[in-house]
Every structure is written in C-alpha cells, then in structure tokens.
Image (cartoon, rainbow, N blue to C red):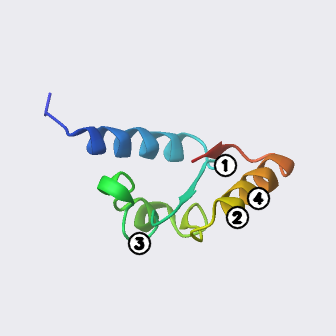
Amino acid sequence: MAKMTMAQEINSAIRNELERDEKVLLYGEDLGVSGGLWGVATNLQKEFGVSRVFDTRLAESGIGGLAILDKDISLKLNI
C-alpha cells in the first residue's frame, strides 16, 4: 500500500463520497480552483464540476446560509 499524506487521505475520502452520491456537495473558502488549504480538494472541481465543488465568499454567514438552503432542499451536505 502506498503511503499518503493526511491531505491526500482527506482528498481520497471526499472523492469517494462525491463518486458514491451525486447529491454530495463540497464548498468552502478557496476550495474550488485552488484546492483549499493543504490541497485537500485538489482536482475535485475538475473531476466533479463547479456545480458540486465550488468556492464560497469569505463570509461565514454566507456559508451558513448556503448550508441551511441545502438542508431545506434535501441535499446531502459535506463541508
């Protein structure tokens, strides 16, 4: 078994969930294009598209509001 960094392990776990369930979303600050802090979301936007992996504004109230909207429309939420 190949050794992986913690960031690679997290990326793999997120990828598995995105593959398993098309309702899973990943969003947060700087996740989309840059892959997020430590690269935990690297290449996920390329693989799953901007509708499922995307950046939010740098405002916790916006992220919280989006989470509430997701819950209200019955989407599974991963942040």
Quickly name the residue at label 2: 62
**Residue type indicated by callout 1:** Lys
Q: From this viewpoint, which residue is outermost toward the left?
A: 2
What element does badge 1 sit on?
A: loop
Q: Nearer the viewer, residue 7 or 25?
A: 7
Of pointers 3 and 1, the one earlier in the residue sequence: 1
Circles 2 and 1 in contact, beta carbons < 8 Å = no
Figure check: 9 above or below 45: above
| Spatial CA span between label 4 and label 2 | 5 Å
Q: Callout 4: 10 Å neighbours few (<14), some, many (20+)?
A: few
Quickly name the residue at label 3: 33
**Residue type indicated by callout 4:** Gly
**Residue type indicated by callout 2:** Gly
Quickly name the residue at label 1: 23
Quickly name the residue at label 4: 65
Of pointers 4 and 3, the one earlier in the residue sequence: 3
Residue lying at 76% horizontally and 58% vertically, measured from the top left: 65
Circles 4 and 2 in contact, beta carbons < 8 Å = yes
Residue lying at 54% horizontally and 40% vertically, measured from the top left: 20
Circles 1 and 4 in contact, beta carbons < 8 Å = no
Residue 69 screen position, x and y as percent: 81, 56
Determine whether, in the image, residue 37 is placed left or right of residue 74: left
Determine whether, in the image, residue 40 is placed left or right of residue 60: left
